[in-house]
Image (cartoon, coloured by chain):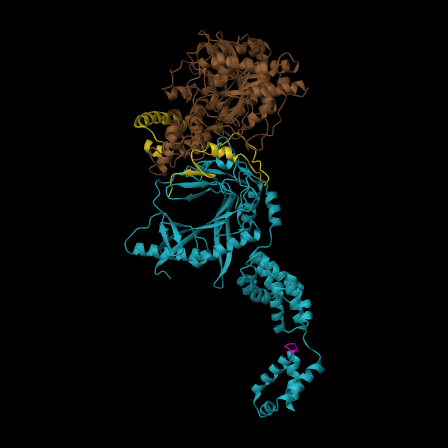
Amino acid sequence: MSEITNLTAKEINAGLVSKKFKATEVMQAFLSQIESHDGELNAFISLNEKAMDQAQAVDQKLAKGEDIGILGGVPVAVKDMLCTNGLKTTAGSKMLENFIPPYSATVVNRLEKSGAIVIGKCNQDEFAMGSSNETSFFGNCKNPWNTEFVPGGSSGGSAAAVAARMAPISIGTDTGGSIRQPASFCGVVGVKPTYGRVSRYGIVAFASSLDQAGPLSRTIEDSSLVLESICGYDEFDSTTSKEKVESWSSSTENVSLKGLKVGLPKEYFQDSIDPDVEKAVESAKKNLESMGCEFVEVSIPHTKYSVPIYYIIATSEASSNLARYDGVRFGHRSNFSEKPAADLLDFYCRNRGEGFGAEVKRRISLGTFTLSSGYYDAYYNKACQVRNLLRQDFVSAFKQCDVILSPVTTTPAFKIGERISDPITMYKNDIFTTSTNLAGLPGLSLPTSLSKDGLPIGIQLTASHFEETKLLGVARALEKMTSFEGRPSNV
Amino acid sequence: MDIDKVATLARLNLTEEEKVQFKTQMDSILSYFNELNEVDTSGIEPMVTPVEVGQKLRDDKPVVWENIDQVMENAPEVKGNLFQVPPVV
Amino acid sequence: MYNDWEPVIGLEIHAQLNTESKIFSNDSTSFGNGDNQNVSPVSLGMPGALPVVNKKVIENSIRTGLALNCQIRNKSVFSRKNYFYPDLPKGYQISQFDEPICEHGFVEFNLDGKTKRIGITRAHMEEDAGKSTHHGDYTLINLNRAGVPLLEIVSEPEIKTPAEAAEYARTVRQILRFLEVCDGNLEEGSLRCDCNVSVMKKGAKEFGTKVEIKNINSFRFVEKAIEYEISRQIEVIESGGEIFQETRLFDSTKNKTYAMRKKEQAHDYRYFPDPDLLPVVFKQEWVEEIKKSLPELPRDMAARFQSEYNIPEYDALVLTQEKELASFFEDVAKLSKNPKSASNWVMVELQRELNEQKLDISQSPVSSKRLAKLIELIDTKVISGKIAKTVFALLLKEDKDPDVIVKEQGLVQITDSGAIEKMVDDVIAASPNQVEQYRGGKDKLFGYFVGQIMKASKGQANPEMINKLLKEKLKG
């Protein structure tokens, strides 16, 4: 059975179609892997009790010779930010501890339409606010490579689940690096598509103008497959694009990189970067050069402002997006039978004060302040203006190059508890990932090497808006050249 | 920054400890944010969202959504098919 | 009027736009469905639910803006107005802030024989909140209304009197109803009218502190509430007090405004552009297309009625108060070819009947076709004006054409001079005393003879012919 859990989504789907194994066997294999390892890793908040039944339905389809879809029979782990009809969706928060949505996110509907089966819901930072998974109400998820380390965040559970072979593919959400950073920390592929590629309908909103869901997997091919399934216009999300969705799993195979221009933003290599991370970028550069890529220095002058812009915009939007968690229609309500509400203000303050954890309260407070009367222009509006300048930086840079190569983070995974008490340091670690979201660009993290401590390191590739084909093509070629052994030894 | 005012505006009960901690952290975060003042943004449009195309409009056709029962099951307190809250007048 | 004080009045009219579905979700807007039945994740503010704009709302807003002489923004922005209230599911209301769809318009109306123009600052789209009902120790929330589309029409603060305010509001309602974008029902809340009132010393440059009055459900009360509020403010200031910026409610039974319980918190709505909704951008062609499809508006229609039908301004204004009434009148005028008479019948006889029966013109028991026929019967002298009233009364009860009624009831006017002459002769023969007195100079008795002849003819004899023959015969 351990063999099955080592297969990619593509291989599982092919194996099912060629009747090498059954969907129920596949599901059982992954459930057993979860059973053996998730006690320690805590990558899942809940499991789908109907997963085996759904696998059986796939087997029945196969028996009748019916089409099972491009992800038919493939288990998918879904971050707990995505609503799943009838299956608890918590966003990693006490606020939604018992919330069972009566609808599914468009992403979940599309995955299911492609035949994928939701195996369970992944642990995450509370409301995706964090980069270490330490803010989850359901306890820290751990890094499968070394359980003393964080898996990254906020999609830590999604990254850990794939790294630990508890699911071949997973879905995360990325607001400022929340897919790419944990992918890098856990040694898996993570893709944040262009803003507007993937519907946000039914995904718990953190920061509306930045949030974008995307796949985590062990190969670029699998992520491409997932993207084919989830991307595209959705009538329930006004911000989705009608841009063509390609068959990336096939179109990105064997792309020639000859003459392709790769940009290295000079501002990205000024901060203190961990030598292992620097080495990873250097070796990716060599590999790309060997395939015929040309390297050009580009400039993103507003890089140093990306973290402040990001935190102002993200917290401002979040302060409003999280206002709906008030304990009126769903979510946590304080025990008023024990101690009645003094007034309406008390009703709200208690529900929200108890339901949200410290980091969420800190960010809501920050965002409330940056939008408040007298401060709006200095913070929110100013940040939006600089955001525009940052976007223009990228537009200019992409006139000189096809993709940008950079680190994902300044360091590999850090130890649990190491940074939680220092929000600014934690925030500053997002320097390379936040600008992608601010500009709305597609980006991905590809695992390339291990640090001297045996922790995975990924490199980041970023492309221009809607240039996923190019982005995935380059990544796939680079993946072939990279000798990354993607399996943590203890799982 | 007046943490009490912000907490009230955001409808959050904070413990005294949280207030002290948040105030210190937020003051330093805000001064970090003030780095933005170095940038001359006169005449620059604020960018609200990365999407540049205009709004896609929906046709005016009502659709009945049938899962209201599950919504009421999620609700902390209901009376009939209505949400119940403490008196607000 | 108010000694040396000058009131400053501005109105905010919230009009519920007539659409089948809500502004940001496809829930039905139909009235009277069960509790929380017109809802979905979007209107319930469930996690991850997103707004999608209803095209009809934009279209109706443009229509209204054009009719209110506004400039239409080809790019307008939805913003979030953040505040907590149990019937506001998302914790923010999606509204428009600094880039509303309509700006800089005006309406005109007649008041005391003069044309008055009131500026419109803006008209913006927003979603309605739900409904809270209070039951002592708890409150219940129904979200059927949450997300119903509203257009908030804000006047310039240049209304000078309570009567002007009421007339302004009536005019806006009239236009909305002509456009068929809002049914304008104040009692059901599909039209809500909030009044901002302040007073200042005559000629002062700066406005006084304004007070907002809510909860007014008729135009008559708009006038009364403002009237009360002006006097109250003047009184407070003159007695050395101070006016606070606050919201007051109008109590129509006591004819007074009173302050709402003090708000717990000062408002800071933290408006910012809604990142879930891109700016609403449309081509000028769409606006032009809508402009072409605009119906004739009340004031244009009234002017046309005056010139085309040669009826007095007063009649034209009354007849154009409601679109259906105007079109009813036009049908009658055209079919009967007698606009003046059509106007009289519609405004007097029919209106009285409708008022009595509390009916709308669309429910009129007499169709325009039948009323026109009735006028035609008078004009062709088939019946007299007096008989026509009898026929009209019968039309209200019976589903028959007027000529059928006239025939069945034998109400046709007698115009046969031989028959009338015989009746005249009979009456003269039967009243020798009166004849003698008349001939002796008692002219007033003429009416007596007419009455007798009318009686004999059951009112059907042509009065002109009676007059003529009677005069000749009485001369002897």
Residue found at x 56% / y 33%: A236
C270 lies above or below C159: above
Which percent across, then down, holds residue B74? 46, 32
Q: Position of residue C264 (x, y in %)?
A: 34, 41
Q: Which residues are magenta?
A: C458-462
Q: Is residue A67 left or right of residue A380?
A: right
Q: Is residue C238 visible?
A: yes
Residue C461 is inside the magenta segment: yes
Q: Residue furthest front?
A: B80
C457 in the magenta segment: no
Name the quarter where the N terminus of chain C is drawn: bottom left
Q: What colour denotes chain B?
A: yellow
Report which quarter residue B17 is drawn in: top left
Q: Is residue B45 visible?
A: no
Quadrant location of residue C414?
Answer: bottom right
Chain in cyan, by letter, is C
Camera-nearest residue between A14 and B52: A14
Q: Position of residue C342 (x, y in %)?
A: 61, 66
> How many tags in the picture?
0
Q: Main secondary structure of the magenta part?
A: loop
- Chain coloured brown here: A
Q: Position of residue A310 (x, y in %)?
A: 45, 26
Please state, as top left, top right, bottom left or bottom right, where the C terminus of chain C lies in the image.
bottom right
Q: Is residue A190 above or below residue C99?
A: above
- From the viewer's side, name the closer residue of C287 and C372: C372
> Residue lying furthest left in this view?
C240
Q: Nearer the viewer, residue B49 or A11?
A: A11
Q: Is residue A459 above or below residue A237?
A: above
